[in-house]
Image (cartoon, rainbow, N blue to C red):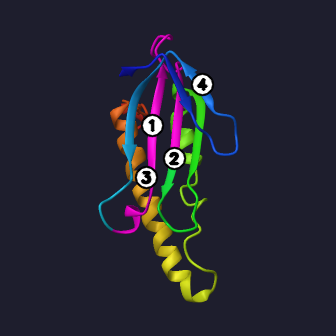
Amino acid sequence: MSRSDDVTIRRTGQPALRLTGYGLAAQSSSRSQQGPTQNRWHDLELWADDRVPAGEDQPHCVVVRYCTQWQGELGHDHGEVVPRRGIGDVLRHYDPVEHLTGFPPGQHYEAKQAGLQRAIRAAYDHAVSGLLEIAHVWEMVDPESRP
């Protein structure tokens, strides 16, 4: 974990979050060199409050940035402070295509829009998996409950 004394997390349409004593626990990105996610992608960060002992109640800041280079489309910054046990819920409830505006309206573009949305959702899911693995966020499975 890299430690920082003061971090500002920008949030679109909301006041920024000011984190003191948080360290960067993990980063992940859905950006690719070619294809649908070369112009639209998500950067993810997880910040942990280093002043609190590790555990399921340790405060974390989950950051999701929708980045775009598509003409006329705006990016979006989301940040939320939750206990460690809530990290997965924040990432699961974030809609990765909410800010996508890419194609003109009309039936002619529906298939292309649907394909783009599938690609962005899949890339986001991969980035989430990477972030959770790097940060060692696990769901515990009871060995006796397996089929």
**Mark 1 Cα shell of 10 Å, populated few (<14), some (14-19), many (≥20):** many
**Mark 4 Cα shell of 10 Å, populated few (<14), some (14-19), many (≥20):** few
Residue nearest the viewer, comparing 72 with 122: 72
Relative to residue 9, is residue 43 drawn left or right? left
> Given contact means CB atoms under 8 Å apart, are the residues at marks 3 and 2 in contact?
no
Mark 1 → mark 2, Cα distance in angstroms: 9 Å
> Given contact means CB atoms under 8 Å apart, are the residues at marks 1 and 2 in contact?
yes
**Which residue is labeled 1 in the image?**
45
Is residue 146 shown to the viewer in this render? no
Residue 86 location (% of width, % of height): 56, 32
Residue 133 location (% of width, % of height): 34, 37
Q: What stretch is highlighted in magenta?
A: 35-64
Mark 4 → mark 2, Cα distance in angstroms: 17 Å
Question: Residue flagged by tag 3: what amino acid is it?
Answer: Asp
Mark 4 → mark 1, Cα distance in angstroms: 15 Å
Q: Quadrant of residue 45?
A: top left
**Which residue is labeled 4 in the image?**
18
The residue sitting at 55% across, 71% down in the picture is 102
Question: Residue flagged by tag 1: what amino acid is it?
Answer: Glu
Q: Which of marks 1 and 2 is nearer the N terminus?
A: 1
